[in-house]
Image (cartoon, rainbow, N blue to C red):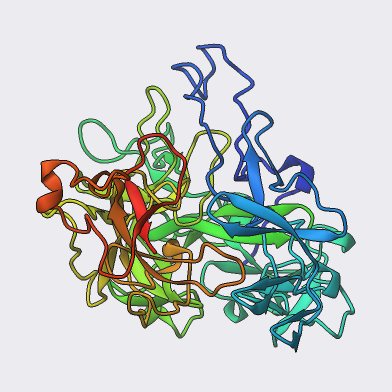
């Protein structure tokens, strides 16, 4: 299979970059071809891509130090909305920390990562923060050429795909058969098909009277589509290899990560596997692993820990702009969950997955059915990823991790989008950086007034209204009108 030249890409000119803090549309003219109904509505916050010790400056739309700068220390989140400067950790609970582990979280050494690059504290060692520890770079992550202390995975090499200063780990290859499905072999190793010319995600255009639209030569016309859609699989010359239709491939992301330049997701068309909606999957596109690759129209959502997850239907999680409803969309009882917490500055498309809506305070909506064979929990968090705790108890049914903890017990994952680590109406959280996260029940602040009253009549039958004996419903957010508190 022959390949056309690799698309010319420069870090400064990547038009498909998705950032956490979206820029304002610079073209307010109502005739702009991209926003023909005028500017999209302004957004009051970033969509979650800032580091754990950053906040979004909504005026400049940039991620900034939440402490305003620390003199000789590191800014650490100590509770929801509260940050403090802490001296860079050397030991935690008497244990010597590794290079890159600069914080004590839950009494243990921890590194600090960032979706925006730059602030990954493992960078100096040529590594990436993975969980609490520094790990060697993985596929498509930036690496240091010739660094034997932080090598790429076996069968991968550190290649100057973009430049010598922006080398990434790629799999070595002699031909396309040695690459993963949806990748092509290039002079710098296996790369996602979306990086090559004529490999954009396409569908054939349906004709109003049936069939498909064609050009003067009788060839079917193709329409470029965004992430979340199905797409036509192609050969190395950009020619579709399957019959006219929407295609069996999945238009998804291939993600490059750079220490100082951030996260760069590229749209690429991946061949489907055979795992159905709700079935187990892995983030592995090897030729022999199709059983754990998601089928057409599905995305592997890594909720089980590591690279393991569950196949869920793809959707467009970009907030709607005036006159531009995001497509594809989920059902009326579902939410399109922005599990990656991306925002497209072009107000075009963000890859999301469909999950059932729920509400921890509604007796008819506070329980969640299994997703396939995987149990799920009603987690009171926003599908957009902007708020970790919803204000009114609305939430989403998130597939549970392989193991969940009991209320009050230590839990393994505080980011619910990576899998529910607790049962319904609970969050895996810690309000103190020195205390390990635990499963914490939520409560309705309206049903626990400070004057000791009983609250509205609905509190008598509302689930999760009050806390168990021995705990008290406490406010965890200063947002006006917020009802959700924590049982502490």
Count of picture labels: 0
Q: Quadrant of the N terminus?
A: bottom right
Could you say which is closer to the camera, residue 455 or residue 178?
A: 455
Query: Horizontally, is 109 left or right of 470 in the view?
Result: right
Task: Please identify the residue farthest to the front as the structure is shown.
Answer: 451
**Residue 235 image offset from top left, x and y in percent:** 53, 62
Q: Quadrant of residue 118?
A: bottom right
| Residue 349: x %, y % from top left | 47, 42
Question: Along the line of sight, which residue is nearer the eye, 140 or 55?
Answer: 55
Whether residue 6 can be seen here: no
Residue at (39% x, 42% y) in the render? 220
Residue 11 drawn at (x, y percent): 77, 48
Question: Could you tell me which quadrant the C terminus lies in?
Answer: bottom left
Quarter of the view holding residue 273: bottom left
- Is residue 189 among what the camera can see? yes
x and y, in percent, of residue 128 in the image: 72, 71
Q: Is residue 484 above or below residue 310?
A: above
At horizontal 33% and vertical 73% (from top left) the residue drawn is: 400
Q: Is residue 184 left or right of residue 443?
A: right
Closer to us: 454 or 32: 454
């Amino acid at each position: 299979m022959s390949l056309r030249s690799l698309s010319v890409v420069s870090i400064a000119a990547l038009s498909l970059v998705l950032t956490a803090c979206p820029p304002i549309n610079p073209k307010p003219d109502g005739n702009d071809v991209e926003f023909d109904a005028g500017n999209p509505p302004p957004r009051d916050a970033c969509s979650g891509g800032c580091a754990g010790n950053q906040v979004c400056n909504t005026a400049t739309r940039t991620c900034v130090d939440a402490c305003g700068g620390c003199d000789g220390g590191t800014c650490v989140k100590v509770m929801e909305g509260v940050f403090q400067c802490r001296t860079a950790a050397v030991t935690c609970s008497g244990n010597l920390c590794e290079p890159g582990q600069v914080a004590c979280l839950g009494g243990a050494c921890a590194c600090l990562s960032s979706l925006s690059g730059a602030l990954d504290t493992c960078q100096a060692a040529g590594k990436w923060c993975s969980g609490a520890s520094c790990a060697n770079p993985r596929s498509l992550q930036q690496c240091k050429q010739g660094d034997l202390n932080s090598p790429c995975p076996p069968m991968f090499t550190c290649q100057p795909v973009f430049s010598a200063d922006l080398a990434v780990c790629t799999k070595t290859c002699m031909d396309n058969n040695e690459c993963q499905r949806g990748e092509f072999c290039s002079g710098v190793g296996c790369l996602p098909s979306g990086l090559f010319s004529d490999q954009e995600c396409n569908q054939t255009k349906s004709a109003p009277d049936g069939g498909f639209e064609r050009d003067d030569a009788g060839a079917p016309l193709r329409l470029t589509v965004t992430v979340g859609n199905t797409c036509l699989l192609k050969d190395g010359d950009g020619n579709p290899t399957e019959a006219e239709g929407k295609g069996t491939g999945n238009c998804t992301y291939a993600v490059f990560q750079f220490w100082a330049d951030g996260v760069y997701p590229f749209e690429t068309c991946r061949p489907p596997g055979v795992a159905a909606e709700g079935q187990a999957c892995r983030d592995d596109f090897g030729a022999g692993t199709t059983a754990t690759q998601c089928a057409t129209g599905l995305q592997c959502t890594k909720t089980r820990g590591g690279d393991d997850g569950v196949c869920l239907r793809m959707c467009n999680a970009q907030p709607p702009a005036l006159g531009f409803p995001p497509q594809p969309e989920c059902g009326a009882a579902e939410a399109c969950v922005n599990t990656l917490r991306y925002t497209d500055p072009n107000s075009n498309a963000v890859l999301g997955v469909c999950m059932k809506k729920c509400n921890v305070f509604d007796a008819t909506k506070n329980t969640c059915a299994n997703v396939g064979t995987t149990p799920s929990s009603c987690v009171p968090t926003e599908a957009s990823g902007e708020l970790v705790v919803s204000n009114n108890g609305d939430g989403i049914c998130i597939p549970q991790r392989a193991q969940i903890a009991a209320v009050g017990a230590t839990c393994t994952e505080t980011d619910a989008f990576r899998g529910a680590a607790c049962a319904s109406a609970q969050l895996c959280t810690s309000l103190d950086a020195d205390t390990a996260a635990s499963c914490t029940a939520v409560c309705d602040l309206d049903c626990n007034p400070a004057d000791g009253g009983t609250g509205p009549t609905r509190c008598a039958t509302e689930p999760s209204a009050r806390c168990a004996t021995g705990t008290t419903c406490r406010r965890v957010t200063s947002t006006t009108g917020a009802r959700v508190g924590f049982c502490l």
